[in-house]
Amino acid sequence: MRRSLQLLACWALVSLLSGCAALGGKRPVSGEDLTQTRRIGVVSLLGDEFHGLRIGTTVFQNARYSVKVPEWQIDAYATDKAIELLRQRSRFEATALDRRDLVIERLRVDGPQQLLAIAARQGVDRLLVIRPGTATSQERVLFAPGYGMMERSFLNLMRRCVYAAYRIDVLDVKTGQEIAWEWGGDFPCEYGETPQLPFLPGLEYYSAEQREGIRLGLLRRIDKSMADALGALALIPEPR
């Protein structure tokens, strides 16, 4: 949990210093930047932490937990999905950022410089960073940044979903500037999508079959939201 919080704090600081999300609002890649884009590097920093959330009618009914699921390989999946979409639906070359020399803990100190240095060595001109993120307003604030499962109740109304709450930053590797960013889809989840499982106090309380259903639900959510986000960024045609 501490590692995830450090990563989020790091990127919050980077965003503040660069004046990106907090001041400029989300924006697609401009036409000028698109013409100068040839090769895109992709890295996911979603991590391996799954969040279980229950939001009740009162704060006394709220509950949450976080658990590591490295075997799900969510970073690899999100990276591969973005690369697949870029290769299939755009004119850009796309490749995964080499993570072998990446020291996650250093991001708090170095900001994106470590990522940009690796990207430069790989010869990419744009870096696409997939990272945990959620808004501070509207209903998005209820979701823990990253991914997990949400149960929300109000009186007799119950809503559940598997969610992915992230954002995508597009950086110019040469200048280090953020040139675009977008949420990972219109909303972190779609209430009512399968699996529809009640909140339990930990992922280990679900059966192996149920956990697999949750994992597959998350992958489907990443598939859809990634296509939506890359379309909104103007890197691929927007899905119909």
Image: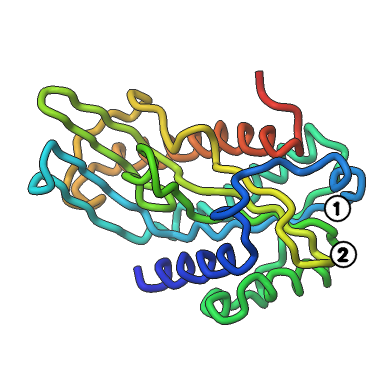
Residue 37 % position (x, y):
87, 49
Q: Is residue 9 left or right of residue 44?
A: left
Q: How many marks?
A: 2
Q: Residue at x 87, y 38 (%)?
A: 91
Q: Farthest front residue?
A: 23
Which amino acid, mark 2?
Gly
Which of the two residues, 207 or 67, is positioned nearer the viewer here?
67
Q: Is residue 91 left or right of residue 142?
A: right
Q: Farthest left residue?
A: 60
Q: Is residue 2 above or below residue 213?
A: below
Query: What label sits on residue 39 in the rendered view?
Result: 1
Residue 214 % position (x, y):
36, 39
Q: Quadrant of residue 213?
A: top left
Which of the two residues, 204 or 26, is positioned nearer the viewer here?
26
Q: Is residue 84 above or below residue 158?
A: below
Which amino acid, mark 1?
Arg
Q: Earlier in the sequence, mark 1 or mark 2?
A: 1
Q: Which residue is mark 2?
A: 123
Residue 171 % position (x, y):
73, 58
